[in-house]
């Protein structure tokens, strides 16, 4: 069984893939509070599927790009679980999971962009082909600098309609699609390291 979760957006999302498909999934009802919500959601998903941590054979985790605090919660949890259970951990670009869902659901049919909220009035952005294959590395910048009239998947389009007038769903990553992407080999697997794209707000003081 593959346990997948993503904490790159304001909501926490968790899913369990049993080989033939996703057997349980849950998303936090509240935004933020990643540290308080991830563990209970993992317990909920396992219970719903009648599974135990010992049944897991791998862990998949969204590596962002996303805010420092949210990503840290997900990645530390993923690495800890993988270490304790002695199973592999697979990192996935969170934008890739959004792209695959959009293609599968038919909200896009040609080349498109994924843009998510980076706060500070900026967005994370990457471009994709009609199959959902990423064409470039994710970047972070002001919406005006990344503006396009083409289809844009993700929350960034809703937040900045002047820069991205052709908004398409989904808005935030779903762990169910992250799990499918890894289980079916439809996405590049990355090390479980965070894609911050910029320095964290909190830095240690020099001594």
Image (cartoon, rainbow, N blue to C red):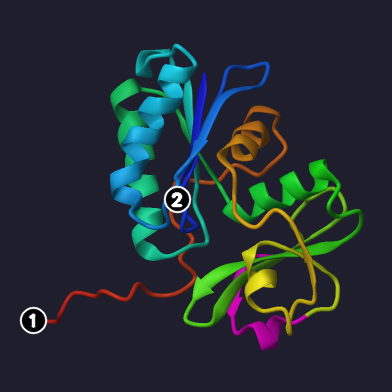
Q: Is residue 6 magenta?
A: no
Does 15 appear above or below 107?
Answer: above
Query: Is residue 97 found left or right of 39 in the rendered image?
Result: right
Where residue 162 appears, x then y in whole percent?
74, 84
Label 1, secondary structure: give it.
loop
Does 58 appear above or below 190?
Answer: above
Q: Earlier in the sequence, mark 2 or mark 1?
A: 2
Q: Which quarter of the figure is the C terminus placed in? A: bottom left
Q: Residue at x 80, y 79 (%)?
A: 148
Which residues fall within the magenta stretch? 136-147
Q: Is residue 141 magenta?
A: yes
Quadrant in the rendering for residue 21: top right
Q: Nearer the viewer, mark 2 or mark 1?
A: 2
Which label belongs to residue 91?
A: none
**Rounded to the nearest whole Å, what is the CA distance between mark 2 and mark 1?**
33 Å
Q: Residue at x 69, y 32 (%)?
A: 185
Query: Is residue 202 found left or right of 61 in the rendered image?
Result: left
Where residue 182 appears, x then y in whole percent?
62, 34
Q: Which residue is mark 1?
A: 207
Q: Which residue is mark 2?
A: 7
Q: Residue at x 59, y 42 (%)?
A: 189
Q: For the residues labelled 2 and 1, say whether their Cβ atoms are less than 8 Å apart.
A: no
Label 2, secondary structure: give it.
loop
Q: Residue at x 32, y 76 (%)?
A: 201
Q: Nearer the viewer, residue 207 or 48?
A: 48
Asked whether the viewer can see residue 56, the reply is no
């Amino acid at each position: 069984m593959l346990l997948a979760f993503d904490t790159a957006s304001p909501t926490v999302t968790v899913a369990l893939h049993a080989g033939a498909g996703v057997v349980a999934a849950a998303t936090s009802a509240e935004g933020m509070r990643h540290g308080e919500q991830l563990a209970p959601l993992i317990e909920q998903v396992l219970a719903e599927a009648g599974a135990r941590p010992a049944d897991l054979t791998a862990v998949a985790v969204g590596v962002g790009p996303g805010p420092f605090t949210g990503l840290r919660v997900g990645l530390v949890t993923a690495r800890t679980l993988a270490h304790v259970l002695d199973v592999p951990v697979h990192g996935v670009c969170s934008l890739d999971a959004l792209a695959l869902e959009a293609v599968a659901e038919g909200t896009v049919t040609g080349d498109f962009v994924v843009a998510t909220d980076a706060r500070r009035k900026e967005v994370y952005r990457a471009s994709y082909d009609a199959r959902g294959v990423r064409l470039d590395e994710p970047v972070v910048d002001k919406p005006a600098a990344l503006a396009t009239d083409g289809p844009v998947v993700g929350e960034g389009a809703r937040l900045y309609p002047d820069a991205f007038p052709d908004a398409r769903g989904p808005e935030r990553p779903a762990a169910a699609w992250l799990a499918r992407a890894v289980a079916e080999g439809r996405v590049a697997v990355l090390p479980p390291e965070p894609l911050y794209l910029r320095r964290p707000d909190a830095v240690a003081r020099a001594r």
